[in-house]
Image (cartoon, grey):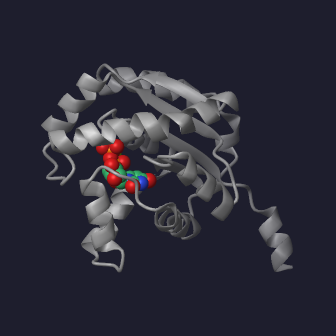
Amino acid sequence: MERFLLQEQTEPFITFVLGGPGSGKGTQCAKIVETFGFKHLSAGDLLRREIASKSEYGSMILNTIREGKIVPSQVTVKLIQKEMESSDNKKFLIDGFPRSEENRMAFEKIVGTEPNVVLFFECPEAEMVKRVLDRNEGRVDDNIDTIKKRLKVFEELNLPVINYYSEKGKVFKINAVGTVDEIFEQVLPIFAACEAIKQVA
Ligand code: UDP
Ligand code: MG
């Protein structure tokens, strides 16, 4: 009976939100949550929460973030999976993940599913650097040295993920230069046109 009930449940609706550091992923996620009622899971925030809670991986995560490198996939995927499993809301915005092909494959293997939609916030490097240096959130990685490393990691490791999903026709490219509202005007029709999200509680 339980098995039957599980099968009856609707599949989750998963959106990966990608783009370089400072491309506006978090800001636009807040707008998407407001309008479409998604559960926002920022991979970076989940990792920072691990650091703050002094968990066993805290110091490793802190060092990795400081270096602008990517935390081992197992760690990040488990954190995301835990949040997904404990959420009543099955419409997920997964922000800042997957950051590499290895991340992507680990997610698909461990969680056992693919995203429905991938948003890619495209932003010139100079603009991303300016935004990160101006945001004053007290982050250990918002300094010019780490930003340069993060941009390199983004290009080398994250762009292949975007290319992979582009070939599958899942990527929606957003011009991330402009006001928050101007950018959201490009995001809105993507979800508004998506019948599938209306069927997910
Ligand atoms: N990070 C990671 N794996 C992830 C997400 C983030 O290793 O899936 C680390 C990585 O070191 C990254 C940092 O956390 O540079 C900050 O990520 P976040 O997404 O918060 O930064 P943003 O791109 O929004 O500036
Ligand atoms: Mg962010």
Name the residue at 18% across, 29% down. Answer: 130
Q: Position of residue 142 (x, y in %)?
A: 19, 45
Name the residue at 42% across, 43% down. Answer: 34
Name the residue at 65% across, 33% down. Answer: 194
Looking at the rendering, which quadrant does residue 197 occupy?
A: top right
Q: Position of residue 66 (x, y in %)?
A: 24, 55
Which one is in front, 91 or 118? 118
Reply above or below: 85 against 193.
Answer: below
Q: Is residue 201 left or right of residue 134?
A: right
Q: Position of residue 11 (x, y in %)?
A: 72, 55
Q: Position of residue 145 (x, y in %)?
A: 18, 42
Reply above or below: 2 against 181.
Answer: below
Q: Is residue 190 left or right of residue 153?
A: right
How many numbered discs, if any?
A: 0
Reply above or below: 128 against 93.
Answer: above
Which one is in front, 76 or 63? 63
Tell me if I can see residue 154 in this picture: yes
Picture quarter with the C terminus = bottom right
Q: Is residue 137 left or right of residue 73?
A: left
Looking at the rendering, which quadrant does residue 59 occupy?
A: bottom left
Reply above or below: 43 against 179.
Answer: below
Name the residue at 75% across, 62% down. Answer: 9
Picture quarter with the N terminus = bottom right
Looking at the rendering, which quadrant does residue 6 occupy?
A: bottom right
Tell me if I can see residue 35 in this picture: no
